[in-house]
Image (cartoon, grey):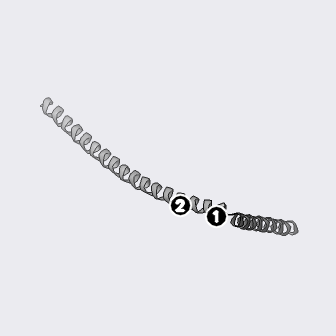
Amino acid sequence: HDNGKAIESLHDRVAFLKRLTGDIHDEVESHNRMLDRMGNGMDATRGIMSGTMDRFKKVFEKKSNRKMCTLVMAFVVSFLIIYYLFRMLRYVRG
């Protein structure tokens, strides 16, 4: 009688461990798929960034393009400074 209860208890524990290991396996498989997708996404992003860097190198190889980029950057920085000053002026006036 006690052996039957012990065997039943052991059977329940084994069944629980089997379900638990199955759940762990499913979770690991899910994470592996997610990591594969992330790796593929990173590879695609790396390719896009590489192409963009190549285009930037081509643009900066010519002096006229370099001057144009410098002019555009100066314009953007000037715009940001003016925007910041007007914003501060509005804040001071209150």
Q: Which one is in front, 46 or 20? A: 46
> Could you say which quadrant of the image residue 78 lies in?
bottom right
Q: Which one is in front, 83 or 48? A: 48
> Where does the image place residue 67, in percent across and percent down from the top left?
74, 65
Q: What amino acid is found at the position of numbered circle 1 in the picture? A: Val
Task: State left or right for residue 30 relative to residue 70.
Answer: left
> Where does the image place residue 90, in percent across and percent down from the top left?
84, 69
Locate the N terminus and report the quarter of the image it occupies: top left
Task: State left or right for residue 92 relative to residue 75.
Answer: right
Q: Earlier in the sequence, mark 2 or mark 1?
A: 2
Could you give the CA–CA distance between mark 2 and mark 1, rounded to whole angstroms? Answer: 13 Å
Report which residue position mark 2 lands on: 51
Badge 2: residue crowd in 10 Å (few <14, some 14–19, many ≥20): few
Question: Please, which residue is most extreme toward the right here?
Answer: 93
Report which residue position mark 1 lands on: 59
Query: Residue drawn at (18%, 38%), measured in percent from left and top?
Result: 11
Q: Secondary structure at mark 2?
A: helix
Query: Residue drawn at (86%, 68%), measured in percent from left and top?
Result: 89
> Could you say which quadrant of the image residue 19 lies in?
top left
- Asked if marks 2 and 1 touch (Cβ < 8 Å), the reply is no
> Where does the image place residue 4, in percent across and percent down from the top left?
13, 33
Query: Residue drawn at (34%, 46%), measured in percent from left and top?
Result: 28
User: Above or below — where is 43 with respect to 63?
Assistant: above
Badge 1: residue crowd in 10 Å (few <14, some 14–19, many ≥20): some
Locate the C terminus and report the quarter of the image it occupies: bottom right
Q: What amino acid is found at the position of numbered circle 2 in the picture? A: Gly
